[in-house]
Image (cartoon, helix red, strand yellow):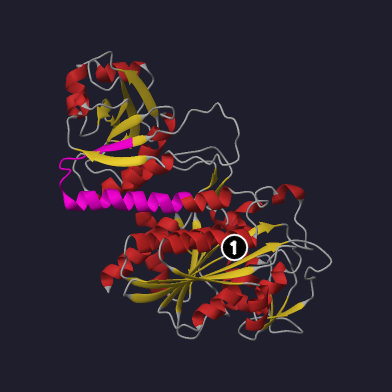
Amino acid sequence: MTTLALTSSSPATLTVDALVIGLAQGPNGLVLAAGAETVAAALGEGLLAALTGLGATGKAEEVTRLATLGATTPGVVVAVGLGPVATVYDTELLRRAAGASIRALAGTGKVALVLTPTGDPVQVSAVGEGALLGAYRFDRFRTTSDAPAPVADVVLVVPDVRDEAVAAAARRAEVVARAVALARDLVNTPPSHLRPNDLADVARTECERAGLAVEVLDEKALEQGGYGGILGVGAGSSSPPRLVHISYRGGGRKVALIGKGITFDSGGLSLKPAASMEEMKMDMGGAAAVLATVLAAAELALAVDLEAWVPMAENMPSGTAIRPSDVLTMHNGLRVEVNNTDAEGRLILADALSRASQDGPEVMLDVATLTGAQLVALGARTTGVMSNDDGLRAQVVEAATEAGEGSWGMPLPPELRKGLDSEIADLVNTGPREGGMLTAGLFLQEFVGEGIRWAHLDIAGPAYNSGEAYGYTSHGGTGAAVRTFVRYLEKLAASS
């Protein structure tokens, strides 16, 4: 992974291959962002004119290269757009600017960024995250490639490298970026190499390396435990399901995390169209986010107690697969009539929510690539957040905003609950088409223990970027919800 370091040396004299400065849109033309003064002095009054001549506009994430011709030690200056000039720039804007510049500089060995001139720890963490995530690449299965290598080393220019808060912010950026990269790697791994037992093995290996307690329940243990939802969904696959339990003791408030781990979703007997299956390796994005979050919490030594429950299954059609109209007996005893085998994620989550409730957590959070309705309602970049507690929903949305992940609070209208009634069982697993994201949340709510504050994050769109890379986000897995969860846990620990 790309390294991250700090320096307080003059940017114009740094021994790096490229130097990134900020460029903004002023009322009368381009304006250099704070921190670029020594670079401007070295290059002279023609710097802004040269950038203008090269087509720079200062638009957010726009990257413009300029050869310094020996005027500065770095041979290349890169101006990254920050949009309208401001006294203080938004942290997500800086995060994306850092990511865009590092992506554009692929093939460069060492890059310094002058985007945190005040040394504000929040901005240092954001710029560090953006730079490291911008350098992310998934090439595990490539035997040859002519693509330039990601930037190897990133240096952030700050006023004082001895500032402990700044050093801690840089370390946090490394931890968070490493966690997000792990989640991205897992989502990007093809289902041929990541079946339920493989994902469980990754969880065991990573958690044991971090000194975390981890338990893997196989199909026999799931049957003994009455996990009818997980077993039902996994029944059609030759690779049996798993339920992974991870514990972290940070000495604080008790939180349960649950993540959907469908390693491939064909839709089961309610088969998806072929085109809709192409990206279904990403249907374990919630599981990846939970695993990565627990590892990050442990590395940051957050003062919280975490119990993570990660159900894993492959949803396949076969002679042993569950059928529409089958009835499953769930972990909490409720019986569910399956009217759509492609609504499988809520079935495995229901069992995990029920089991996690038995431990009596103060807060329970689940995350899942759950519904196509999320994409219809909120698009590809905004997570839907539902909760049985208005205050918790607001806290999760606030944490997501601070972390730079788009989210929006959504309701759980009680009048929609009727759509989940079954004529022969306690529930059906899908309700009417209208409000599909919300009825999925209402279904999950049936498996939350009484008195437990719970929030559900639907990341069906945000978990996978089907388009071109932007900012610090590559094509493919995004690691959605990891930064939101880490930020939420940080704030919860601080309030204890």
Q: Is residue 119 above or below residue 262?
A: above
Mark 1 = which residue?
A: 261
Quadrant containing the N terminus is top left
Residue 486 can be seen, yes or no: yes
Residues drawn in magenta = 154-181
Rendering coords of residue 264 (x, y %): 67, 57
Residue drawn at (43%, 27%) of the image: 107
Rendering coords of residue 35 (x, y %): 20, 33
Rendering coords of residue 430 (x, y %): 68, 70
Left or right position of 271 against 314: right
Q: Which amino acid does the dot numbered 1 rest on?
A: Gly
- Membership of 163 in magenta stretch: yes
Residue sitting nearer the eye, 90 or 330: 330
Which quadrant of the figure has residue 490?
A: bottom left
Which quadrant of the figure has residue 19?
A: top left
Left or right position of 89 against 375: left
Q: Is residue 27 above or below residue 421?
A: above
Left or right position of 170 against 239: left
Left or right position of 245 against 159: right
Residue sitting nearer the eye, 22 or 243: 243
Pick out the residue farthest to the right.
319
Residue 381 can be seen, yes or no: no
What secondary structure do most residues of the magenta stretch adopt? Answer: helix
- Membership of 350 in magenta stretch: no
Q: Which class describes the residues within 10 Å of circle 1: few (<14), some (14-19), or many (20+)? A: many
Residue drawn at (50%, 41%) of the image: 474
Quadrant containing the C terminus is bottom left
